[in-house]
Image (cartoon, rainbow, N blue to C red):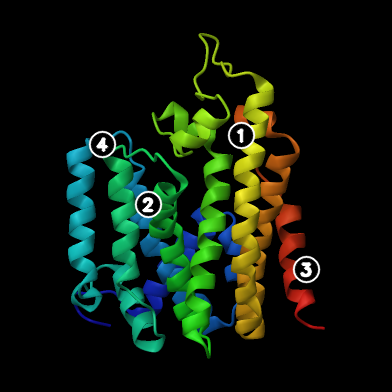
């Protein structure tokens, strides 16, 4: 252990703790990996979580959040130069052991900066840029840990799977985002379905319920298309990595289908899956790869 720093083992334990306490959905997949990959992906998640938390700190002034993001971007240029930071210590070690494209974190920071600045999205192509920044990038980082013999084919599929998960997140969080002054659904889609996502003085949706339901189901069907592309990644991975990715995707896809089944309920409260259901999806992902 460096006299002024954190030991590698302790750094990985710190990242594992971040996953256990904050990765309510991803933890089910990460634990299916063998030890070295599990530690590496935990380091990737812990740094991504740090970036997300800065962007989501609505109590802090935008200028302060942008400054913190810029600082993390600079630190990322040489993670090994920060021996007292357990996340960067773990990330530096993981990047030495696996071909993790650390520059993809820069795209994640780009997306979080857009959040801080309150960016809106006019078309789906505009939203796609954001999804690729904040989630497609994480898919590509994860692929660096998983490994593949055909990265040229696998990278776009990892990106697509990340997009699918982010679209699911957006539908899950419509109400919460609205309360924070954020609307991610494309303006042209809202206009197409005659929706505003505004709420009346009692906090109820002001849009006609049939229009809201049609809007949500339209966006959900779009997400399903991205899952169809992204899940083609799984046969390109080793068994344990495929189980990990399959569990993560399976949990979010179940969530998406629950939203599709009752769109209006999803707009009233954050849709979630109980722990037993997440565990069942993970077990199915692992069992399906034993055949």
Q: In the rendered structure, find residue 284 and report the number of the disc placed on it.
A: 3
Q: Quadrant of residue 28?
A: bottom right
Tags 1 and 4 in contact by the CB under 8 Å rule? no
Residue at the extreme right of the image, as rendered: 291
Report x, y in % for residue 168: 58, 48
Q: Nearer the viewer, mark 3 or mark 1?
A: 1
Q: In the rendered structure, find residue 215 and report the number of the disc placed on it.
A: 1
Judge whether 273 appears above or below 110 on screen.
above
- Mark 2 lies on a secondary structure that is helix
- Mark 1 lies on a secondary structure that is helix
Q: Earlier in the sequence, mark 1 or mark 4?
A: 4
Which residue has dot 4 on it? 60
- Mark 4 lies on a secondary structure that is loop
Judge whether 175 appears above or below 146 on screen.
above
- Callout 1 crowding tier (Cα within 10 Å): few <14, some 14–19, many ≥20: many
Residue 102 in view here: yes
């Amino acid at each position: 252990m460096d006299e002024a720093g954190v030991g590698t083992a302790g750094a990985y334990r710190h990242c594992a703790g971040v996953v256990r306490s904050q990765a309510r959905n991803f933890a089910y997949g990460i634990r299916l990996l063998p030890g070295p990959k599990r530690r590496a992906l935990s380091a990737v998640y812990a740094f991504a979580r740090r970036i997300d938390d800065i962007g989501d700190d609505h109590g802090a002034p935008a200028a302060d959040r942008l400054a913190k993001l810029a600082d993390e971007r600079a630190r990322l240029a040489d993670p090994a130069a920060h021996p007292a930071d357990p996340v960067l210590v773990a990330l530096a070690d993981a990047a030495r052991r696996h071909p993790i494209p650390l520059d993809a974190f820069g795209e994640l920071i780009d997306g979080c900066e857009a959040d801080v600045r309150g960016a809106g999205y006019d078309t789906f192509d505009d939203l796609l840029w954001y999804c690729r920044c904040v989630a497609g990038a994480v898919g590509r980082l994860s692929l660096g840990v998983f490994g593949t013999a055909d990265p040229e084919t696998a990278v776009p599929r990892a990106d697509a799977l990340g997009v699918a998960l982010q679209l699911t997140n957006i539908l899950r969080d419509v109400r919460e985002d609205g309360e924070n002054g954020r609307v991610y659904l494309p303006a042209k889609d809202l206009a197409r379905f005659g929706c505003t996502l505004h709420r009346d003085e009692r906090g109820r949706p002001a849009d006609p319920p049939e229009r809201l339901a049609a809007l949500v189901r339209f966006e959900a069907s779009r997400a399903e298309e991205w899952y169809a592309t992204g899940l083609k990644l799984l046969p390109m991975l080793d068994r344990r990595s495929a189980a990990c990715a399959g569990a993560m995707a399976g949990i979010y896809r179940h969530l998406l289908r629950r939203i599709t089944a009752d769109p209006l309920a999803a707009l009233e409260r954050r849709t979630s899956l109980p722990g037993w259901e997440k565990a069942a999806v993970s077990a199915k992902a692992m069992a399906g790869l034993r055949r």
